[in-house]
Amino acid sequence: MVDVTEEQTERTIARAIMLNNNLCTIWETDEFCLYNGGYFHKGTEPMSNVRTNINTIAKEVLLPTKDPNVFKPYYYSISKRNTIIEMIKTDTFTSINEFDKDPQIICIKNGLYKLNSFDNCLLPNPLTKDGSYNTSKSHPLVFGKKNFLTFDEYINRFEKPYKTFIQVPTEYNPKAECLIIDQFLTDIFGFDTVPLVYEMIAYFLMPHIRYQKAFILYGPPSSGKTTFITMLWKFLDGLKNFSGVSLQDLGERFQMINVMGTILNVFDDLPDDPIGDTKSFRQIVTNEYLDSEVKHLPEHVKWHNRTKILVSSNDLPPVRKKEGNPFFRRWILIACYNTFKETDLMTQEDIDDPTISPKDNNLIKKLCTPEEFSGLINKIIEAWIRLEKRGYFPKEWNDTEYIKNLWMINTNPVQLFVNECCTVGNVEKTDYEIFYHTLNKFRAEHNAKPITKHACTQWLHRIPGIKKKRKTKSPDYYYDGISINDSSKSESIEVLYDKIELEEEEDNLDQFLEAAMEKTKKEYEEENL
């Protein structure tokens, strides 16, 4: 029973709710947040919790009457409930900028980890086996630095909970390892790329966008991209913390609001549609604050931005021809070249191919265990420290010109090959067939589809000085104004004749290739006379 006077009933109920719940109201969005389990929950849960509490307490309220021995029940209405809610909001307003203020803290399921340690913390008693302080004996309290505090230890130390919306639903265990995850990342990205992948995941958890990078996983189907994203979804509680707007849709009206409050906008298997306006993408990657139109609201909503972007695609999606460095320099491209096939569908050729591995249909279950995720936390902590100390992602992943050329390999199918493997000049020449087949081999190595001979010639003609001409006294063609670099010429001949079905024995094939190279050389010399 709650005994109050009628004039103060709503205020008393509001105070009772605030006393029993750690609530705050975001000033910028007028949204209730409820602290529970180490972090503040947003969405419908806090408001539903408050309404339930109001209803429960209101049923217990008894108001006095003229007769001191008689009480009457409190008349509860929607209007009074809204009054109570407004009282709570007024007393709990907090700016969204008060959340995740310390970029060194990671909120984990069983506590808070701080990279540069918490100061003046009560340390375990060195004189007892379990670290406890025996109250019956005079043991001086020992204080010092600690990297990890439970939520209760943090509140005892700082007298209030740490304000964060994000929690990794995994317990911290400094001794844990993630050997299965390590091997999985090596299988799909390659051993040298694994450290970058851990730094990428660490960046996802950082409450800032200081490094201004987005990430795209690209490679053939069945190369592990979706499995990796599924693992991230489970590790970072994607249902609460992820949004899913495609690059093609980010520029659409009312779409930006969908990334508010998320740590990652992830889209698996991008469509082949061209990316249009990239302004919204660039803002998410670089702007500390974002704003967006919201349907049925007269004003834009503004918020602090911590959202990162991760997408996957079999082929890099086409972009506008006029797209410049401000778009390309924001990307890190991570190739996935290995593929996974069902064991019973693998041929002997597949078994001998180091880029093809048997598919494990239980892999997700093996990856997403508490032990593996605790080990992943330790890897992320190491990567976080490494990235913060360096201050940027490795330079080999920041070559804007290379990223632009690689991306544009479908928009301009020949340019990257010309830049990396060819010499352009008035005296340069190369065989038509050799150039065409070598180009498509290069494109296959970069996970791009082959192009036709007609398309090859069309794109080359856009480069000043390059023309397709017929050889003297021959029905064959060559390209004038371009040659394949010496390091690729012998390989080019092999590429050409790999395409031709020959019945000769191996010894005759060697002679045939040698004669072909000599013939090509002779034709070039004749053209130069």
Image (cartoon, rainbow, N blue to C red):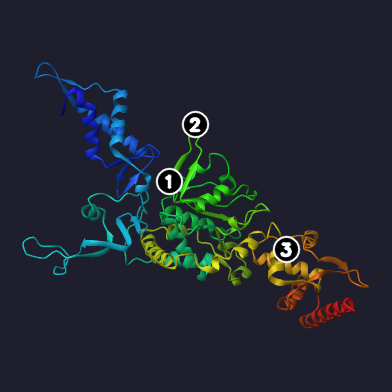
Residue 83 located left or right of residue 300: left
Tell which circle, 2 or 3, labels the residue nearer the N-terminal end: 2
Image location of residue 511, percent across then percent down: 81, 83
Q: Is disc 2 placed on a helix, strand or loop?
A: loop
Which labelled disc corresponds to residue 7? Answer: none
* Residue 332 picture location, percent across and down: 55, 61
Label 2 to label 3: alpha-carbon separation: 48 Å
Q: CA distance from mark 3 to mark 1?
A: 42 Å
Q: Secondary structure beneath disc 1?
A: loop
Write the residue at 46% across / 57% down.
210
Residue at the outermost left position: 136
Q: Which residue is mark 1?
A: 261
Q: Nearer the viewer, residue 332 or 454?
A: 332
The residue that disc 3 covers is: 414
Number of residues whose C-alpha sits closer than 10 Å to that of mark 3, classed few (under 14), some (14–19) or many (20 or more)? many
Looking at the rendered structure, which numbered label has been put on residue 296?
A: 2
Amino acid type, residue under disc 3 in the picture: Val
* Apparent side of residue 107 relative to residue 411 in the rendered image (left or right): left
Query: Residue shown at 27%/49% (left/top)?
Result: 161
Q: Residue at x 29, y 24 (%)?
A: 80
Whether residue 441 is visible: no
Badge 2 density bin: few <14, some 14–19, many ≥20, Cα 10 Å: few
Q: Earlier in the sequence, mark 1 or mark 2?
A: 1
Relative horizontal placement of residue 263, taking residue 95 as reference (left or right): right
